[in-house]
Image (cartoon, helix red, strand yellow):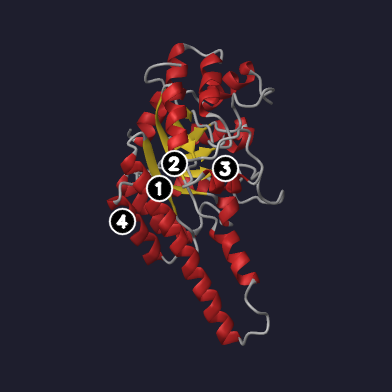
Amino acid sequence: MTGPSAIDAHVHTYPSREIGRQAMMGSGRTDYGGTPEELIGIMAGAGITRAVMVNMTPVADMMDAAIAKIPADLAPARRGEAEADARRTMISRLQRRNAWTCEVAREHPQLVAFVGLDPSMSEGELLAEIEARRDGGARGIKLHPAAQRFYPNDDRLAPVYSRAAELDWPVIFHSGAFALGPATTRQASLQHFPPLLRAFPRLTVVLGHMGFGDWNTCAAIARDFPNAMFDCCFIVNGTEPKPEISNEDAAAAFRKVGTDRVMFGSDYPWFDPALDAARIARLPLTEAEKRAVLYENAARAFGV
């Protein structure tokens, strides 16, 4: 692919290859490591002009690990202090990751910074982090209900959604199954998003992974909520030699949901942005539909 052909709506970046490989936990479909420099090289060869970094920090899992290290025989007051110290440490790590993401975007204008928040943060902490990262160049928020163990319409995040709507910041959510978590995880099921979409009609909500292939529910959400968008990363990719969904079925799914509502996303470094964009370019869609999915929908949704 050549020219200004695509915007990748869903990538993850890491400070080093080693950190990126560790984050994938052996589940990646590529040998990539997730560094910004590596990604930019891939983008240049594939005609991908912008990529949205949806970096997040797994605060809940890190808190579990920290609490497990606290001696079981500590007095209740001391234990409470130790847990509070651990929480402050984890939130500090989230803040440093957000600062790094913004720094990368400033150094590399092709990359767009979306930042992570956690529902365990107080309202003051959440809003202060939004303002700090807005000043640092962030353009939106990434949330992962399954990994972060909350439901999308959690009241603790209402101030976040209100402020994001005021700023015209999209919020990208993981939706559907969670490959790196327990099979019983349900927080990211599509059924939990309509209350949020209804409560915040001015908030652009992006449902990553299209609910992992639940086309009918995605189509119903698209019909009922004009503020909902979708990215197709993982579920429609060109990285796997034998994709689970055929080109014909992928095109039909995009049309069912709306080719004006679906965006190309790769989930790099788990998948290869160049191969995934090329797969969408091969789908039996019209040229106008391909342009919408590969470029125009993301340009509109993200203001890039």
Q: Position of residue 141 (x, y in %)?
A: 42, 48
| Residues at circles 4 and 2 in contact by the CB criterion of under 8 Å | no
- Residue 278 image point, x, y percent: 52, 19
Callout 4–callout 3 Cβ contact below 8 Å:
no
- The secondary structure type at the circle numbered 4 is helix
- Determine whether 143 is above or below 266 in the image: below
Residue at (57% x, 62% y) in the render: 62
Say whether disc 4 or disc 1 marks the residue closer to the N-terminus: 1
Residue assigned mark 1: 101
Q: CA distance from mark 1 to mark 2?
A: 8 Å
- Alpha-carbon distance for marks 4 and 1? 15 Å
Quarter occupied by the C terminus: top left
Q: Earlier in the sequence, mark 4 or mark 3?
A: 4
Image mark for residue 131: 4
For residue 53, the mark is: 2
Q: Residue flagged by tag 2: what amino acid is it?
A: Met
Q: Earlier in the sequence, mark 1 or mark 2?
A: 2
Callout 2: SS: strand
| Amino acid at the residue labelled 1 | Thr
Residues at badges 1 and 3 in contact (C-beta under 8 Å)?
no
Q: Which residue is mark 3?
A: 175
Number of other residues with Cα within 10 Å of mark 2, as a class: few under 14, some 14 to 19, many 20 or more:
many
- Residue at the image position 49 percent from the left and 38 percent from the top: 11
Mark 1 or mark 3, which has the lower sequence index?
1
Are discs 1 and 2 less than 8 Å apart at CB? yes
Between the C-alphas of marks 1 and 3, the distance is 22 Å
Q: Is residue 158 visible?
A: no
Please, what is the three-letter code of the amino acid marked with disc 4?
Answer: Glu
Three-letter code, disc 3: Ser
